[in-house]
């Protein structure tokens, strides 16, 4: 068994359907204001001009990926927007891992009944993908991470923390 482990996973976020609708609606509203303003009123046209930057920003920030980086005994979660801007969200120490199992597994039921459990969803939202729940207890807080690890990442975690990692 090697002293250090490494695994990296990138997952495309497909959950934000509402945000996609808002972005499309904003673009349509901008176009309607510009066209109506050109025909009817200069005020509507001016509003349409001011809506262009808001529409561009909404469209630009629609593409989002989550990056899981496992180095030694630390799991870092980051978000990558538009394949260009990376922002580190959280870092977890695997020594604080209480349980890791598929989200539909009964092994997580006792944690889900805890009202103080904070759930952080870093999965794609696609029902066909296998999503795992990782329960961490640190600084008096109980947190569940929803992630989509690869087999390689699962094996790396299982090798070091076999007693708390379940595949079913």
Image (cartoon, grey):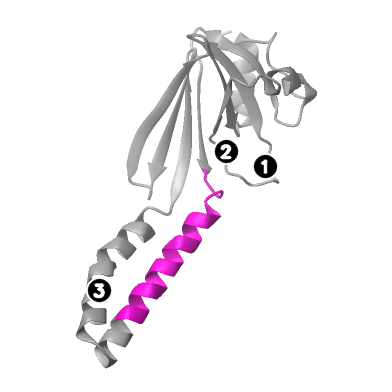
Compared to 79, does 164 lie above or below? Answer: above
Determine whether label 1 and label 3 are within 8 Å by CB: no
Question: What residue is at 48 percent from the left and 59 percent from the top?
Answer: 20
Q: Disc 1 or disc 3, which is closer to the eye?
A: 3
Give the class, few, some or many, for how many residues have Cα within 10 Å of label 2's Cα (few <14, many ≥20): many
Where residue 50 sits, quadrant-wise, is bottom left
Horizontal placement of 128 versus 93: left or right? right
Question: What residue is at 42 percent from the left and 33 percent from the top?
Answer: 78
Residue 28 x, y percent position in the rendering: 41, 74
**Which residue is disc 3 drawn over?**
47
Q: Distance between the residues labelled 3 and 2?
A: 38 Å
Write down the region rendered in magenta: 12-33
**Which residue is disc 1 drawn over?**
129
Q: Distance between the residues labelled 1 and 3?
A: 43 Å
Q: Disc 1 or disc 2, which is closer to the eye?
A: 2
Tell me which numbered mark, 1 or 2, is placed earlier along the sequence: 2
């Amino acid at each position: 068994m090697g002293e250090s482990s490494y695994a990296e996973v990138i997952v495309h976020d497909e959950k934000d359907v509402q945000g996609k609708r808002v972005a499309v609606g904003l673009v349509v509203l901008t176009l309607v204001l510009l066209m109506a303003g050109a025909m009817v009123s200069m005020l509507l046209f001016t509003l349409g001009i001011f809506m262009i930057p808001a529409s561009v920003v909404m469209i630009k920030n629609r593409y989002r990926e989550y990056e899981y980086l496992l180095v030694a005994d630390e799991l870092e979660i980051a978000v990558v927007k538009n394949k260009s801007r990376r922002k580190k969200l959280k870092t977890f120490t695997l020594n604080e891992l209480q349980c890791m199992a598929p989200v539909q597994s009964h092994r997580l039921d006792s944690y889900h009944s805890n009202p103080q459990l904070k759930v952080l969803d870093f999965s794609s939202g696609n029902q066909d993908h296998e999503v795992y729940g990782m329960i961490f207890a640190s600084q008096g807080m109980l947190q569940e991470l929803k992630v989509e690890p690869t087999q390689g990442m699962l094996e790396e975690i299982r090798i070091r923390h076999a007693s708390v990692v379940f595949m079913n």
